[in-house]
Amino acid sequence: MNRREFLRDNVALSAGALAASVLPSAASDAQRIVMDPTPQFEISPHLYMQMMEPLGVTDSSVAASWDYQTDDWRSDFIETTRDLAPGCVRFGGLVSRYYKWREGVGQVSTRPPMRNHVWGGWETNRVGTHEFVDFCRRVDAEPLYCVNFMSDGHTEFAHTHEGQNRTGDAQEAADWVSYANDPDNADRKRNGVASPYKIQLWQLGNETSYGQGGFSKEESIQHTMEFARAMKQRDPSIHLIGWGDRHGGPAEPLWAGDLVRQAGEHLDYVAIHMMGQHPRHPDSTLIGRRWEATPEQAWGELLELANNVERRVTELEQALAGASSPAGIAITEGHLSLPPNNTSPLLREWLTGVYHARSMNIYQRHGARVKIATAADFNGTRWTSNALLVPVPRGRSYLLPAGSVMRLFKRHNGTHGVALKSCPADLDVAASRAGGRYFLHVANLNYGRAVEASLAVDGVMLRAGRTFAIAPENLREYVDQDRADVFVPVEKAISGEPAQELKWRFPAGSVTAVELES
């Protein structure tokens, strides 16, 4: 057996074993998807989130999504995002280390420009608090803001080349909460906004443990308590997200355990980022354009990478459980990190579709803890690690494979997760229900083989069903602005008389949402 065959077969087996956290109970169950109807946990409305960040000269991102002709968000951007249906949208990222919220409120002509220290260039601050919250309301998403958490401890932002101090303290963060949520805030009213924005989700900083020169774990925890007390004093109803990832390599412990032991009373969620999802093998076919000659090997490597998502989520769950913390998990950033950095053309191809589906299925299967999660960055013009691209100077916004998968799963989903009693080993499945309706998110892990399976809910008679599938015949199918609808799911009815089991054939490499009526 050569390396390619070994990788393909073993990745398929390991992925199948993780797929539903069950193994087929008997040979007769090998091709059956059987749901236990008992609700296990509530699925968070914020599970399928997106993340917006001004990316400077690297990707025009936020600026390209704004129509300066009409002085409003681009209508095609609003329309496509509303169809994507994110549960919440986060504004922040590395830019939060030097972002000053007051520069983005009030009369537009008086807002000072901001040098984008990490991403290059200058930001006009045309999109500030009012514009971002307005965008979220128009696409039916909750706003989530990252506050300037003393620049995550990076002191260089206290003394910039422009002679500015770009760090933000707890007082500044608390003032932002008051500006947003206090019904009587004079500054907001003076800026023409009478009603409070009622922003409930706030993250303390961004990637606080990553890189060199930032806070130590102890410093981060102490400042977490300081910020949390100040912010919740202004509005006790807000939900705070603290940083729980590690500093250094995998041998280092997560910060999460000590974080919740010391500051847990102030926090609702603990965040990590699903970064570093990059090729593991020196001769990886995911590097350069090698996958074009060996697409099946690339498929196997991508499934192998998805296993890391499961390991990371499980590790954080164990850290929180070990500290007896009820905090939820927030994966507030995460994407495939394929070379060239953030612009790999492979991320336009359906070869990556099942990776994204497995990632989102893992988050939903762990939904008792995972409450906020994403599989991509959000909007931009050239980064293929995004969910949505905005063609410039004009054109219709469209979804990349990651966005298409998140749209499919978010739109066809239940309110409560349920367990699987059996599942084929080569399908990755997450199951849910809403009343008498049952939902399956199914990814066929096989590169070249369809899987036929019976669909059943234990003890329940099924009377109807529908499937919504993204199933290109060529798994190297790609999307761009001239072929924006290539990954639009196709709806089909599951025919048959009312029965305890229905059957369906899942095409090779497909991602399918199934709805069943009892």
Image (spheres, rainbow, N blue to C red):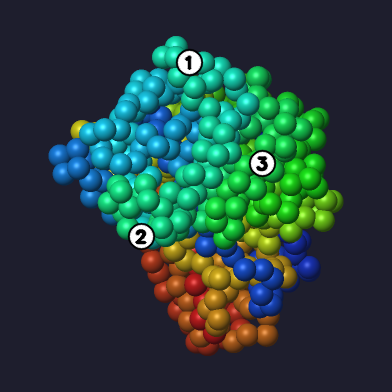
Mark 2–mark 3 distance (CA, rounded to whole Å): 28 Å
Residue under the point 50% across and 33% down:
96
**Type of the residue with mark 1:** Thr
Question: Which residue is label 1 attached to?
Answer: 160
| View extreme (right): residue | 322
**Type of the residue with mark 2:** Ser
Q: Secondary structure at mark 3?
A: helix
Q: Earlier in the sequence, mark 2 or mark 3?
A: 2
Which residue occupies the foreground of this view, 275 or 74? 74
Residue under the point 54% across and 48% down:
202
Question: Which residue is label 3 attached to?
Answer: 226
Mark 1–mark 3 distance (CA, rounded to whole Å): 25 Å
- Quadrant containing the C terminus in the rendered view: bottom right
Marker disc for residue 195: 2
| View extreme (left): residue | 69
Which image quadrant for residue 347? top left
- Percent coordinates x, y for residue 278 in the rendering: 60, 30
| Circle 3 crowding by C-alpha within 10 Å: few under 14, some 14–19, many from 20 | some
Which image quadrant for residue 311? top right
Marker disc for residue 514: none
Q: Can residue 39 be seen in the rendering of this structure?
A: yes
Q: Is residue 114 left or right of residue 213?
A: left
Which image quadrant for residue 300? top right
Q: Looking at the image, is mark 1 or mark 2 nearer the viewer?
A: 2
- Total count of labels: 3
- Percent coordinates x, y for residue 475 in the rendering: 46, 44
Mark 1–mark 2 CB contact (< 8 Å) = no
Q: Earlier in the sequence, mark 1 or mark 3?
A: 1
Residue under the point 43% across and 49% down:
179
Q: Is residue 449 left or right of residue 90?
A: right
**Type of the residue with mark 3:** Glu
